[in-house]
Image (cartoon, grey):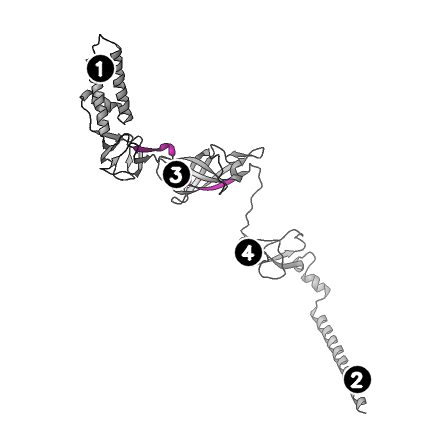
Amino acid sequence: MENNKKKLWFRTTGVKIAIVAVIAFAAGFLIKSYLQPSPAEAEHKHPAGDDTKQQQKWWTCSMHPEVRLPKPGICPKCPMELIPVTSSASDIGEREISFSEAAIKLMEVETTAVERKFATAEIRMVGKIDYDETRVKHITAWVRGRIDRLYVDFTGVNVKKGDHMVYLYSGELLGDQQALLAAIAGARNVKSESFTLATRLKSANVEAVRTRLKLRGLTDKQIAEIEESGRPVTHLTIYSPIGGTVIEKKATEGMYVDEGTHIYTVADLSHLWVKLDAYESDLPWIKYGQEVEFTTEAYPGQVFKGKISFRDPVLNAKTRTVKLRVNVDNTEGKLKPEMFVRAVVRSKVAGGGKGNGA
């Protein structure tokens, strides 16, 4: 009896659930029919050929446009945020994408007209400014002695060619002068009518002593003054061999020096060298005589120019670079040795595909 009651209850409940489902389905159908527009209304709202209903919105990366994802987030190839893109199936092909105005501004896309011209390669290098070695002179003592006066007391002084630099006392120089005066006196005592071997030897001895004095650092003018006065000088004046700037001073007054002692270094800074490092892969583009443009940290925005005058025949095995030497005019005096520079060489591609100076 109890089992029959349970079966009757299950049957009644199932019938009720079925009736509720049918009623819900009918209500949903009626609501959908009421809200959905008719075909005519749909055609009126979205005419044929309107791409609004075909537009699709997806997200891509400004750096990797091949990325297409259905929702925003981070690019799987880089840490940039994805940007939205709206495309129309009727206007955009399978290999095309379309970006909004905001996305285009974010990507900073630039375009230019296609034109026929020579391809130009820009070779960028770094380096430093250095002295022109052909314009650097050392002032040394040509004879042993004592420095009684230095006319230039500190480095950085500008001097002209022939300026007094050192006032040097030398006992050896004094002995050579006495030998010169003795040789001249002996040659004068020889009678002019007796032009014999002795006369020739006297003249040769005078010339030998004069040559020795020149090797000691005396000029022809100084030697002539000694011969005219008949008295030896006690001091030797050393002159600057070139005009320029004193960049080294290695002696002091009262100091005794030997032959060859380094006293000054004078450099002409009106012409300088720029030494650049060029990678071996860029060497085919670099030629002798090419113009080089470079900038310095001291004068940002100002471009200096020079020409390649030498290319080191040996490659640096550690840096894989070759040293280039650029001759630069520095009459304005703005450039200083040891300045760091950034340089560029522009080379055009010739007909055979080889680099040619611009």
Of the residues shown, which amino acid type is indicated by label 3?
A: Asp
Q: Which residue is mark 4?
A: 102
What is the quadrant of the N terminus in the image?
bottom right
Where residue 15 sits, quadrant-wise, is bottom right
Q: Residues within 10 Å of mark 1 (few under 14, many from 20)?
A: many
- For the residue marked with disc 4, what is the amino acid? Ala
Q: Is residue 318 left or right of residue 7?
A: left
**Residue at left 21%, top 27%?**
174
Q: Of the two numbered discs 3 and 4 on the same chain, state the one appearing first in sequence.
A: 4
Q: Are marks 1 and 3 in contact (CB under 8 Å)?
A: no
Q: Using residue 323 as the reference point, say whether residue 206 is left or right of it.
A: left
Identify whether 239 is placed above or below 208.
Answer: below
Which disc is residue 187 wearing? 1
Where does label 2 land, which residue? 11
Pick whichever, 171 or 356, lies toward us: 171
Q: Is residue 32 visible?
A: yes
Closer to the camera: disc 1 or disc 2?
Answer: 1
Q: Position of residue 343 (x, y in %)?
A: 45, 41
The residue type indicated by label 2 comes to Arg
Q: Which residue is mark 3?
A: 130
